[in-house]
Image (tube, rainbow, N blue to C red):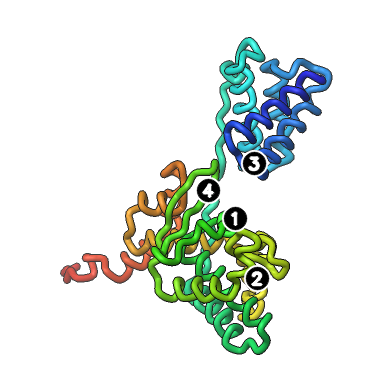
Amino acid sequence: MKNLSILIQKYISYCQFQKGLNSKTTKAYNIDLNQYETFCLPHCFYEKDIICSFIESIRPQYKPKTIKRKVATLKAFFEYLSYEELIAENPFNRINLKMREPVVLPKVIPEKMLVKILNAAYKELNSAKTGYSIKCSLRDVAVLELLFATGLRVSELCNLKSDDVNLSDNFIKVFGKGAKERIIQICTPDVLSALKHYNKEFESEINSSGYFFVNRLSNRLSEQSVRFMINKYADTIKNCMHITPHMFRHTFATMLLEADVDIRYIQSILGHSSIRTTEIYTHVSASKQKQILQRKHPRKKLNINKG
């Protein structure tokens, strides 16, 4: 099975250097393909029956979303091999798969809780005494404000370069999944103020690292640091709900939808390649629909004589 190992490495290199996929994506591809290679030994890796057996073997082990990803990795790998004429035929052309993934509604942060978290961050900033604690609090406020103001993925936020943040024209340039670029305007005065204040205090560290959000060592702020930050403020307000950075994104999108913003605008802001991904938020807004029908349904105005 040495040949398969070589082909996997060729494909990973192709994904890195020609498709421009990020390291997290190629790492996941590598794990999935190595798992398939281990399963294949000593059989022919491009046989239809072997692929089907592999898929059946992982069904009890993983959640539907993970299985779907692993199958998608295999499909893309065999498409590459077929296109490069490294195999005679793509075996997936003869495999009929139906992967039904249950709809999991995104979790949002209740508005009152969101207000409490932001209030706790500003309170810590206002009570900070030392230069170091003031700077840390400034960064916390800027990160939390930007997460909610833009719906950024935490990886997108942490990978913002200094040149990606334009505080003169009030926009940020974001490189999302697949290195797709999008521009997001910053239109809220409080958010702009927080970003400008942070930028002024961290100017030397930002220039040194090249990244907009930095840690105490003047290196790029990590995704884990953002998670710890959010947990800290959630604990401060004695919140029992586990809050993640991605929940800020879900909350941002849901609130826009509930404010009657066209879903295609939301799709563009979030950087979703497919409208189907964005449509998940229409399910979340069912609670808003219930409120509207309870309060404003025209039937309430009709005075019917029921005998």
Q: Is residue 63 visible?
A: no
Label 4 to label 3, Cα distance in Å? 12 Å
Label 1: element kind = loop
Label 1 to label 3, Cα distance in Å? 15 Å
Upstream in the sequence, badge 2 or badge 1?
Answer: 1
Label 4: element kind = loop
Foreground mark, 4 or 2, reads 4
Amino acid under disc 3: Thr
Q: Is residue 278 above or below residue 4?
A: below
Circle 1/circle 3 CB separation < 8 Å: no
Amino acid under disc 1: Asn
Q: Quadrant of residue 49?
A: top right
Q: Is residue 119 above or below residue 305?
A: below
Give the percent coordinates (x, y) of residue 173.
47, 54
Amino acid under disc 2: Met
| Residue that label 1 marks | 159
| Residue that label 4 marks | 176
Q: Nearer the viewer, residue 213 or 224?
A: 213
Residue at x 32% of width, y 66% of height: 292
Give the percent coordinates (x, y) of residue 290.
37, 64
Amino acid under disc 4: Gly
171 to the left or right of 18: left
